[in-house]
Each structure stands twice: as C-alpha cells, then as structure tokens.
Amino acid sequence: MMKTLRDFTLFLLDMDGTIYLGNHLFPETPGFLKAIRDRGARYLFLTNNSSRDKKAYAEKLNRLGIRAGEDDVFSSGDATAIVLREKGYRRLYVMGTAPLRALFAREGFLLTEEDPEAVVLGFDQDLTYRRLLLAHEFIKSGIPWICTHPDLVCPVEGGRDVPDTGAMIRLLEASTGKSPDLIVGKPNRTIIDAVLALTGGEREKTIMVGDRLYTDIAVGERAGIASALVLTGETSREDYENQNEFHADFVYPSVGEMAKELSL
C-alpha cells in the first residue's frame, strides 16, 4: 500500500531550492513547517555543504524568518564526525574551512599534520598548494581518506557556481591514483544512516524532500527511505519526466502542496 505524507514522522529537508532560494524564503515554507509540527512529526534541515557550521545555517534560517536552532540542522560535516568516531579514528589531517576544523576539534579529534590516522577532505575554501601536497603524500602512503560530500560545484549568489569538494576529489584521484575510501554526503546512504542514528528515526517513516535528482532523490533510493521532489529549484517537471535514472516517491510543485496534503 502506497504511503501518504501523513505516514512520515521525520522530514529531512534540503534548503536552497526547496525551502528558500538564495536569500528569498518561499512563501509556502512557514505553512509547510507548521503542518509537519502540527502532525507531531519532526523536520531536520539537511545540507551537503561542509564549509559552514550549524550556527551559521541556523542564523540564516532565522534571518529568513524561520525559527531554528543548531539542533535543527545537520550537515555532511556532522555526519562525517559520527562516521570517524565509529571507525575509531582520532588523529586527523583535515582539509576544510575553519568552521569544519572547529567542528572536528569540538568532537574531540586531534587535528594534525603529522602521522594522521585519516585524511578528511571537505569544502576547503582556503585551499593552498601546501594542503594539497600534504594530502597527496598521506594518501599515496596508504592513509585512508574520507570526504564529506561529492558535489562538483556549489551554487552561489548571482546564478554562478564555484568548485566544490567533488572537484578536489578528482584532483587528488588524478595525482594519487586512488579513490576515497568513503564519501559521506548525499547521494550516499552514509549521511542518512548517521541522521537516523542521531535522531532514532525509523527508516520506513523518514522522507527526504529536495529539488535535486542526483542528490536528494538519489539518496532516498540508496538509503531505503522515501523521497519527495519539489519543482522550485534545480529540477523542472520536464527535466524529471525526460529522464529515467531517478525516481521520486512524490512530486510536488512546491512545499505548499505538501502542506495541504499534510493538513487533510
């Protein structure tokens, strides 16, 4: 029997293109979030971007008019910390922004450039040749490397995009001849497994809501959770109907239609 939205208790929400676009909050968003809360369900804002921390995302959400705390946000960096702890790593060489490095330090990891147990590659917006060289040498020596997410580019204001972690992965793959031991973020199921471990959510009652086929919808398929595609961001209805690689459980023009269904 096909589920309805009212059967889900945990809503994982992509942000840009789903609940807002750039610095513009979609007018349907507050009603959608209220409809989730009114059903006694929970939502969590889920992002692949590991360059910023929970505080920065919570502050942006509040500036846009959404009441949110740090516990309402979960990033690929947060998931990576959970995975590293599960694997027993303590000494890390981290390529990433100051907020990502601070996240790992708060979680009790030792950040080092000498004898690390693992290399961690995030969205390093302060990338230098020296950092690349150290990572290259560590990876070539056999030290495992774990990446926060695979996005090749990151959209920025003005309709542009900039090189993201996936582009850096390809550079290091080319120089070392080795692929990452693990990539955590969407579309990989690891980030969903980490969310469910953190929240105690049930897989069959969890749904991913987003606008990108190859991340948001793909992670639903890989992680065994439901997915809902909204057509307010990257993907149009024509885009969706003219491909057969990704299959959403639900397709909506916006989160406004989801709110209506939840309120029935």
Image (spheres, rainbow, N blue to C red):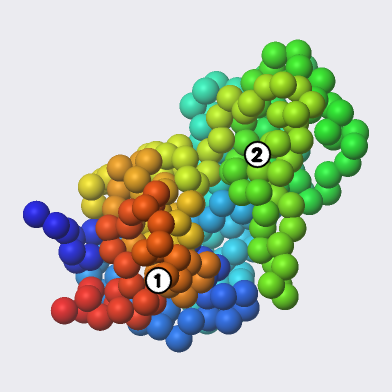
Which secondary structure lies at badge 2? helix
Residue 104 badge: 2
Picture coordinates of residue 118, whole percent (x, y): 67, 23
Image-quadrant location for residue 183: top right
In the image, what residue occupies the spot 40% across and 71% down?
Answer: 237
Looking at the rendered structure, the secondary structure element under dot 1 is helix
In this rendered view, identify the residue nearer to me: 75 or 101: 75
Q: Quick check: can you spot residue 45?
A: no
Badge 2: residue crowd in 10 Å (few <14, some 14–19, many ≥20): many
Give the total number of marks visible in the rendering: 2
Judge left or right: residue 170 versus residue 242.
right
**Disc 1, disc 2: CB below 8 Å?**
no
- Residue 213: percent from the left, percent from the top? 45, 56
Amino acid carrying label 1: it is Arg
Name the foreground residue: 66 vs 26: 26
- Tell me where residue 1 appears, x and y as whole percent: 9, 54
